[in-house]
Image (cartoon, rainbow, N blue to C red):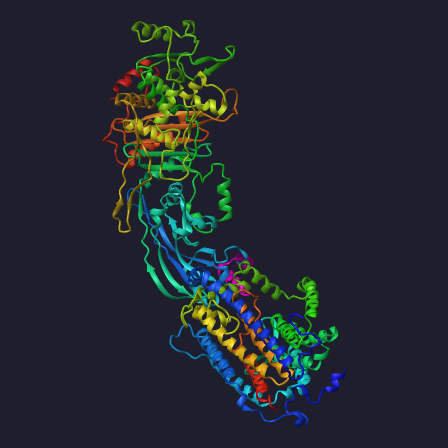
Amino acid sequence: MATRAGIGAPRRSGDRSGGRATGYNVGAPSWRYFDPILLVAALALTAYGALMIYSAALPRDAPGVVISEPVVRHIASAAAGAIAMFVAARVNYRLLDVLGWFAYAFGILLLMAVLVVGVEQFGSRRWFDLGFTLVQASEIAKLLTIIGLAKFLTDYRDRLHEPRIFLLSLAVALAPALLVFLEPDAGSSSVFLVLWAVMAAFAGASAKHFLVLGAALMALVPAVLVVGVQDYQRDRIASFFDPESDPQGSGFNVLQAELAVGSGGLTGKGFTEGTQTQLDFLRTQTTDFIFSVLAEELGLAGAMVLFALFLILILRLLRAITKAPDSFGQLLIAGIVTLIAVQTFIAVAVNIRLLPVTGIPLPFISVGNASMLVLFAALGIAQSVLLHRDT
Amino acid sequence: MGLFSDRRHPVLMAPGAEDDESLRIRVWLLGLFAVALFAVLTVQLVRLQVFRHAEFEAQATINRIRNTTLPAERGLIYDRNGRPLVENVPAFAISVVPADVPDGEERRIASVLAQALGVPAYSIEAQILEGKRSIDPFFARLLEGDADQTLAFELSAQASDLPGVEIEAVANRRYEAGELLGHILGYVGPITEDEFAILEADRYRISDRLGQTGVEAYYERTLRGVPGQRQSEVNAAGRELRTLRLEDPTPGNGIQLTIDLELQAAVHDILIESMGGSLFASAVVVDVHTGEILAMVSVPTYDPNIFTGEVDEDTLTALLEDEGRPLVNHVIADQFASGSIFKVITGTAALSEGVIHPDEVIFSPGVIEVQNEVDPRIVYTFRDTTSGYFDFLRGMAESSNVYFWYLSGGSPFQIAVAEELLTPEDIAEQRRLEAAGIIGGSQDFTGLGAERLAHWARAFGLDEPTGIDLVGEAAGAVGDPEWKLRTFGEPWGQGDSYNFGIGQGFVSVTPLQMAMVTAAIANGGQVLQPRVVGDIVDADGRVVDPFTPRIVRQLDVTPETLEIVRRGMAMAVLGGTAGNAWFPEMQVGGKTGTAEFGEERLFKDQFPTHGWFLGFAPYEEPEIAIVVFHELGSGFLTAEAGGAIMRAWGEINDVFGSVMPALGQLPVRTVEAFNEIARQLP
């Protein structure tokens, strides 16, 4: 494990300070590299989310403008997130390289802890109760796993062609994925695996390895379905494929969401005018089905605006990759791009019957707490890579 | 190489031209990956929001709009004299919509309902759970259709704790006359799921009651009125948020029956008293001018009130197992061989067709023998209970089968008229008639034949429903040669015609059909449609649809012919088989029938019989026609009930004194005495 010895050594590959490097470069950030568009896109999304939450959480019996608790919570967590973003941006991201394994280990610890002391909701143990709010452990673990993966893939980049190392990189993501799966939360669990796949591919893993692994997994699918899938998951999957089989049970939400989206049409029924939303045919409107609220009230046009904002955000992150001084930074941002893109995809797809219900929040839009904080922190890390590219 | 870099080209090396290029590609691919995800979402969104928009928009509208039916007050029913016969009783229906019961709440809600309704909780819970799994979980399951106000208020107070439980105001019916009018009024009862599937479009609610039989069923549309509707917007919990449209209900129209409750009660009592060993009996009284049914009784009967609420299992079983079939209206739904009452048709037909002159005399030795058409060695013997010389009046009065066999089938190929067979009195009579040229010695006689008889039977309204405004009427049957060939593959024989002429064999009739035959004879030949409902009145009592008689057809018959038939019937009461129908206050006409039925002989040559009587009154200006029927009876005894019914009608309508009183009955059975009385008839 030659590279292991390299931990603690200056990362030459990303070191643009030449011979000036002494120990870890924790030089001052260059704020002129701060990407304001990234921040604006994130804030625009947050504001968009606040509007939709406002509409979804509007009291049904009291007319007029009512700023309800979820809206306040959303804005508050966005504000906290913004602070987290600046803090993260200020800190040299290379510190994450040093502390990478600690961060990763902390994530694993959180996931283990939540299985023991977490509070149970809807038959699943996913949350820490902090008294004033619930924090979903996997939300934090996702970012910490990105750090772990970035570190591993950077450290072992030269040996990634070895099947053993390739599988080891998978193990980095598999550990948290399995823990999350035990909560149980198959949706979030799959996010960990997608993170690994995209980051490993980005790091240059061999296509052949993916193909072999993919084939092996396909062979395992039937066994997993029989043994590993919980009843509630089976219900969700069954109701996804045939929601009419149980229109009042787990299929209800799926059908009502599709109805809301479809009835929205091109331009929607108007802000706060969505019948599916306002008459509560949609369930969990501020979280799982927030996109349906948007699509019903603002239509396809509103959805396209949302997608455009996400694409701007993603494009700015891609730009940040090209500016990153080292592979660690590149991989970090690639992971963040993946996190945002994949979570957005899953969260929307659930609303339009492309995927079974997973409980994954729509980034920046779903009423947030931990998720919001993590996302802003992730953007802060991307900013940090930008700010510290000369250091 | 494909997507990913080759290991000979380490990807994350120090910056350089080659690395920049590789990074650019990988960033592009990552971007492409993200864009591809959004593209997939966009395609699906366009599918849902553009191409299937109309479909979803319609569904979303269905989602939020609830139409609540506002029932109209059901019309009331009165007898012909304005006596109220039904009452609308406010009640409450308690039902549960399985889909609206939250998961996990089934047991709690079931136990609350169970306590309130006094039924086992597990059965309610099972109903909810089954309902949820059924095709239509939104279909309300009726738990109690007749709850009282206290219970309804008690449950309403807990409404917010009982999602899915619906309490609706409904009206139940109370039938004041009880079993007296069971068969006529019928009853309203709960709607079955199958019926509801059809009726839903007409704004029926599952908690509504539907006329199940009798007038309640036949006049369902009239009585029901037009339900209103409230269209409101509801939220997902089913709570109504605002009213979008309101349409008031129009109350149902009232109905005035043609039935006279007092006469109905009298007829009922008379039948009950006359039952003897009969399993069932029936009687009907009809106005000969209008076809209005004044009384219609079928016993045993039932109390319609037992069907309006929860039907008691034991009561229902008892009703279903009673051999008298109380639920069947025997006046309209049962058909039997008519027996000798059919002779009024044969007689009318024979006189009208000129087959016989009323004064023409036919000799009956009390028996007729008929050769089989195919095999002459087979000879059928038709026995009669009476014998002698018969003109029309005596044939009718004494119900001579031989006389009517001649009229229907003609003379047989061989009859014994040898004088050695006759009493001296008959010989003298035969010689007298021969001398007067009224009869020939040969007794060569051509009857009506089956076709003409069938034609007349049908003209009188047999072989088809009378069209009475009640459900479940039987059509009866008239078998003619063509029918026999088709049904049995056998040709019609002379014996068949004989049977036909006296209402046996292939004839079956309902008491109601025979009542309309009698009415036609009494009213100058109008076959009328019988009706139990007179005027239709609105909620304020104004007549909206007045009763008008409906004439089915006018018989091709002269008043003289009908008068002779009526005279024959009067003579049957004065000096013939219907003597038991005689009562002093009013002269009436009648005809008995003792119809054989079944295959099983009681003893040698003796089949079980039904008793029939048909009659009209008063004799001079007929107002009513009646038919009485006794299962397992005889016409002689049934005539007594018939007389009592006509007498009751006379008493109730106070006609005695203004109508011709009855002539005295025949003191001795001689031709002279008979003719003497017949001459006294106007």
Q: Is residue B178 left or right of residue A177?
A: left
Residues in magenta?
B103-131
The percent position of residue B276, horizontal first and vertical second, equals: 45, 32
Q: Is residue B111 magenta?
A: yes
The percent position of residue B83, horizontal first and vertical second, equals: 30, 45
Q: Is residue B352 left or right of residue A254?
A: left
The percent position of residue B498, horizontal first and vertical second, equals: 42, 18
Q: Main secondary structure of the magenta part?
A: helix
Which quadrant: the C terminus of chain A? bottom right
Which quadrant: the N terminus of chain A? bottom right
Quadrant of residue A177 within the rendered picture: bottom right
The percent position of residue B153, horizontal first and vertical second, equals: 42, 63
Residue A127 seen in the figure: no
Q: Is residue B136 magenta?
A: no
User: In front: B302, or A208?
Assistant: A208
Query: Farthest residue in the right direction?
Result: A1
Q: Is residue B21 left or right of residue B212?
A: right
Q: Is residue B184 above or below residue A353?
A: above
